Image: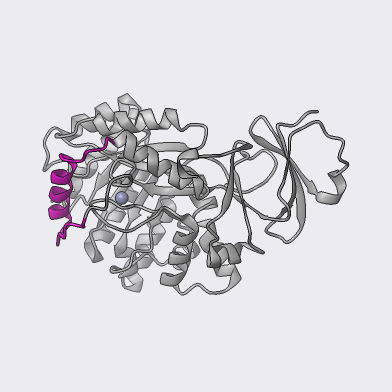
């Protein structure tokens, strides 16, 4: 049978070399290099020349609508609170000379060139911008479908109760094509945990959709909100469809509060997204995994009003996780790598995120001797395949 692609002589994570056959965008077979290389195939062949083959990277948390990539550098506007940053961003947003389609498109190309094959992107939904950001992301999702799977969260960045009309807009966003309902600090932003969660979970239940909430609220308050989220998840039968992003509180709880909160998160199959942020507590990765809570990672802000930093490189992100968690052994670096591959792949519904027959042929080739070396050295040059097709972005060449 003629394959769409035969990738020859790729180094696998276990140290062996394999030829990978792709048919219909899916990995059809992986076999030791020596067993297949007879030179008589009529299928297109790509010689990996011993480069390390890794699964495509999955970014569990970006904001494609917020990035300022493509514009001249805009100095960061300091803001002491989440609320003041929200207002600073809205003010900046009104005067940007590039559209969301242009800026988001450039970011997608940058992410793709670095080996990212799928993202979960939040998009601002508020009474000023309405559904315009969502419409732009839906257009980007269609335009870049050959190189990037894009899952969209309708995100009430300005709050829900403090911005009357947003609840209806979230409902409309779900009808218009958003995949999940977002939320933001039920206590810290809206000052009403039950009121905020009633709306978020109400819209999710109505549309049969999952939920991904931003939770910056710290300490015991944040942990209380996490347990409320878990209770509602269980009550609505949404186990496995809910994620909480940031959840800084998990990094600052006493043993009793951590244990009871993690136990409930595990029961409700809630996944925790962490960027391994610098100045605040972060969820303890190994403790959560031991408690049965899935953890994944993502870039969050990439050169936007919230941060002048970020490049979307998920190997770098895995390295940042290692830094913050004091991960140093090869086994630890491989664990961090799984937070930008297997874990987010499961969260966004793309399967195991592993290279195996039957999996999407989304992979990258990189000059490294092992997964741990790839995380530590993170070579810039990456050859990316999406559904077995070589990805090329001429604008970045
Ligand atoms: Zn975010």
Name which residue lies at 28% across and 29% down: 173
Q: How many marks?
A: 0
The percent position of residue 43, horizontal first and vertical second, equals: 77, 32
Side (left or right) of 145 relative to 184: right
Front residue of 362/69: it is 69
Front residue of 397/65: it is 397
Side (left or right) of 390 relative to 146: right
Name which residue lies at 49% across and 48% down: 58
Q: Colour scheme in the image?
A: one colour
Side (left or right) of 196 relative to 253: left
Residue farthest toward the top in the current orientation of the protein = 175
The reply to whether residue 228 is visible in this rendering is: no
Q: Quadrant of residue 131?
A: top left
Q: Is residue 231 above or below residue 321?
A: above
Front residue of 327/316: it is 316
Side (left or right) of 107 relative to 123: right
Q: Is residue 59 magenta?
A: no
Name which residue lies at 34% across and 42% down: 64
Name which residue lies at 86% across and 50% down: 34
Magenta-drawn segment = 75-99
The reply to whether residue 299 is visible in this rendering is: yes
The percent position of residue 19, horizontal first and vertical second, equals: 76, 46
Q: Quadrant of residue 334?
A: bottom right
User: In the rendered image, which quarter contains the N terminus?
Assistant: top right
The percent position of residue 128, horizontal first and vertical second, equals: 14, 34
The percent position of residue 296, horizontal first and vertical second, equals: 45, 55
């Amino acid at each position: 049978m003629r394959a769409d692609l035969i990738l020859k002589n790729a180094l696998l994570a276990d140290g062996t070399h394999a030829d990978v056959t792709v048919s219909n965008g899916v990995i059809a077979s992986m076999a030791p290099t020596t067993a297949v290389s007879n030179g008589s195939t009529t299928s297109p062949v790509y010689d990996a020349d011993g480069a390390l083959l890794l699964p495509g990277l999955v970014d569990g948390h970006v904001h494609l609508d917020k990035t300022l990539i493509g514009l001249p550098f805009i100095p960061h506007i300091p803001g002491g609170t989440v609320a003041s940053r929200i207002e600073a961003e809205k003010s900046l947003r009104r005067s940007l000379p590039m559209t969301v389609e242009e800026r988001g498109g450039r970011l997608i190309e940058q992410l793709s060139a670095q080996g990212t094959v799928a993202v979960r992107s939040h998009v601002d939904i508020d009474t000023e911008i309405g559904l315009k950001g969502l419409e732009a992301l839906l257009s980007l999702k269609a335009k870049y479908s050959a190189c990037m799977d894009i899952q969209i969260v309708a995100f009430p960045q300005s709050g829900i109760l403090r911005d009357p009309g947003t609840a209806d807009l979230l409902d409309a966003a779900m009808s218009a094509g958003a995949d999940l309902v977002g939320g933001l600090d039920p206590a810290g932003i809206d000052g009403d945990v039950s009121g905020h969660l009633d709306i978020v979970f109400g819209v999710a239940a109505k549309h049969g959709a999952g939920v991904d909430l931003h939770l910056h609220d710290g300490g015991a308050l944040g942990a209380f909100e996490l347990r409320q989220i878990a209770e509602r998840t269980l009550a609505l039968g949404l186990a496995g469809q809910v994620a909480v992003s940031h959840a800084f509180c998990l990094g600052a709880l006493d043993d009793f509060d951590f244990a009871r909160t993690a136990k409930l998160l595990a029961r409700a199959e809630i996944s925790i997204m962490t960027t391994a942020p610098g100045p605040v507590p972060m969820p303890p990765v190994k403790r959560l995994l031991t408690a049965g809570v899935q953890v994944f990672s993502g870039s969050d802000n990439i050169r936007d009003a919230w941060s002048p930093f970020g490049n979307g490189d998920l190997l770098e992100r895995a390295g940042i996780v290692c830094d913050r968690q004091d991960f140093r052994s090869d086994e630890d670096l491989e664990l961090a790598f799984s937070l930008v591959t297997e874990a987010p792949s499961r969260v966004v519904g793309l399967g195991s995120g592993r290279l195996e027959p039957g999996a999407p042929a989304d992979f990258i080739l990189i000059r490294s001797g092992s997964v741990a070396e790839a995380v530590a050295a993170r070579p810039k040059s990456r050859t990316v395949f999406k559904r077995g097709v070589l990805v090329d972005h001429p604008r970045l060449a």
